[in-house]
């Protein structure tokens, strides 16, 4: 099989030695659905904890960019608040936030907010284990771009934690669990909240079912042992039929299996055709869904190189695909 191009940035080494399937798994966040759910709840406590005021929730997609979307965006009092959640430290996150800022500015009229947009406030929220290392600002080519970056546990406060745990809103208990600092975390917290979720009465079952799923995800993020997770799953009796949120995870999982098969097949086929991709293009392809990959495969079979280049090249910057070592 023809080797893909070496990275044009040394920081990308870890990603370029991976297959497209492995690259996709490294690039695509596994917990976006969970944190978007917490962020977008009406009167969300989670937004308040993150320092985001109440306001007009904005769609996360950018017009014409099917494979690029933010984790959460909101408009309030002249400011767009943009939040990204990360379960792993990503060295490229500062550059990515710089790119998001460009896209938000470019498409800001699309959001049709109820007032003049005067500023952008960006946050990277680290929800994984250990310390957050995704520092601001971003420095490159004489450009400086600042954003806020912090670990979720840095927002822990004893009084806040007490209020969250005594709340009648089940999702607040999940937030409380995420805030506990590593040195104070005990696996029993997860089982305690599972018991409380089972005892909830008088709240919409769909709402409670969503909190059950979020608790399981929070347990994974906090590295809870498999034994405790098995106990919690048994206590929650989570059923796919109970929750649209759980359905989203299952649907995404089924789709990922199809994507895995297509990525492997396409990578082998492209290698036999001596088609090479730049690093940004490989990262972009790794975000494609089944329909986009099927179309990519069709274009490769037809050897329609111009259409193939247009499909796989990120909207910005425009970088060229090469065939047989030459510009396409």
Image (cartoon, helix red, strand yellow):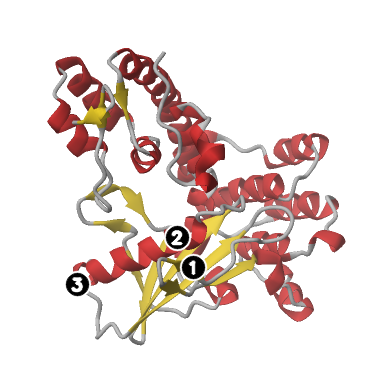
Question: Which residue position is annotated with label 1?
Answer: 138
**Apparent side of residue 315 relative to residue 82 in the rendered image (left or right):** left
Expressed as whole percent of the image width and height from the top left, the position of residue 197 reads: 68, 53
Would residue 173 be visible to someone looking at this image? Answer: yes
Q: Which numbered disc flags the more N-terminal residue, 2 or 3?
A: 2
Q: CA distance from mark 3 to mark 1?
A: 26 Å
- Cβ atoms under marks 3 and 1 closer than 8 Å: no
Q: Is residue 98 left or right of residue 131?
A: left
Sequence order check: which comes first, mark 3 or mark 1? 3
Report the residue at 49% width, 38% height from top.
249
Picture mark count: 3
Secondary structure beneath dot 2 equals helix
Mark closer to the chain start, 1 or 2? 2
The span from disc 2 to disc 3 (Cα, nearest Å) is 23 Å
* SS assignment at label 1: strand
Check disc 2 and report the residue beneath it. Answer: 95
Name the image quarter holding residue 78. Answer: bottom left
- To which residue does mark 3 refer? 109
Q: Is residue 146 above or below residue 22?
A: below
Q: Are marks 2 and 3 in contact (CB under 8 Å)?
A: no
Residue nearest the viewer, comparing 309 with 294: 309
- Give the residue at x 28% y 82%: 117
Q: Residue at x 29, y 63 (%)?
A: 103
Q: Residues within 10 Å of mark 2 (few under 14, many from 20)?
A: some
Residue 133's spot in the image, x, y percent?
65, 61
- Quadrant assignment for the C terminus: top left
- In this view, the residue in front, 87 or 171, is 87
Q: Residue furthest front?
A: 326
Disc number for residue 17: none
């Amino acid at each position: 099989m023809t080797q893909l191009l070496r990275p044009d940035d040394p920081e990308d080494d870890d990603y370029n030695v991976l297959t497209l399937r492995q690259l996709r798994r490294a690039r695509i966040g596994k917990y976006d659905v969970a944190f978007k759910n917490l962020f977008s709840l009406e009167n969300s406590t989670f937004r308040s904890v993150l320092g985001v005021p109440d306001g007009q929730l904005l769609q996360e997609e950018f017009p014409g960019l099917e494979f690029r979307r933010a984790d959460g965006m909101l408009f309030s009092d002249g400011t767009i608040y943009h939040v990204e959640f990360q379960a792993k430290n990503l060295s490229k996150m500062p550059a990515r936030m710089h790119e998001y800022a460009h896209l938000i500015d470019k498409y800001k009229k699309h959001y049709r907010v109820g007032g003049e947009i005067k500023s952008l406030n960006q946050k990277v929220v680290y929800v994984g284990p250990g310390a957050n290392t995704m520092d601001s600002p971003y420095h490159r080519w004489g450009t400086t771009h600042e954003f806020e970056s912090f670990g979720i546990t840095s927002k822990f406060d004893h009084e806040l934690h007490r209020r969250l745990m005594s709340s009648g809103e089940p999702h607040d208990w999940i937030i409380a669990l995420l805030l506990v600092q590593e040195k104070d975390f005990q696996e029993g917290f997860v089982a305690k909240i599972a018991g409380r979720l089972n005892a909830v009465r008088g709240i919409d079952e769909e709402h409670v079912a969503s909190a059950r799923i979020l608790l399981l995800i929070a347990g994974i993020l906090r590295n809870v042992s498999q034994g405790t997770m098995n106990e919690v799953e048994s206590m929650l009796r989570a059923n796919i039929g109970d929750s649209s949120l759980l359905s989203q995870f299952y649907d995404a999982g089924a789709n990922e299996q199809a994507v895995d098969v297509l990525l492997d097949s396409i990578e082998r086929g492209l290698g036999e055709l001596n088609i090479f991709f730049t690093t940004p293009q490989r990262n972009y392809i790794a975000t494609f869904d089944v329909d986009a990959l099927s179309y990519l495969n069709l274009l490769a079979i037809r050897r329609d190189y111009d259409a193939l280049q247009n499909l796989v090249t990120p909207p910005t910057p425009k970088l060229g695909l090469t065939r047989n070592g030459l510009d396409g």
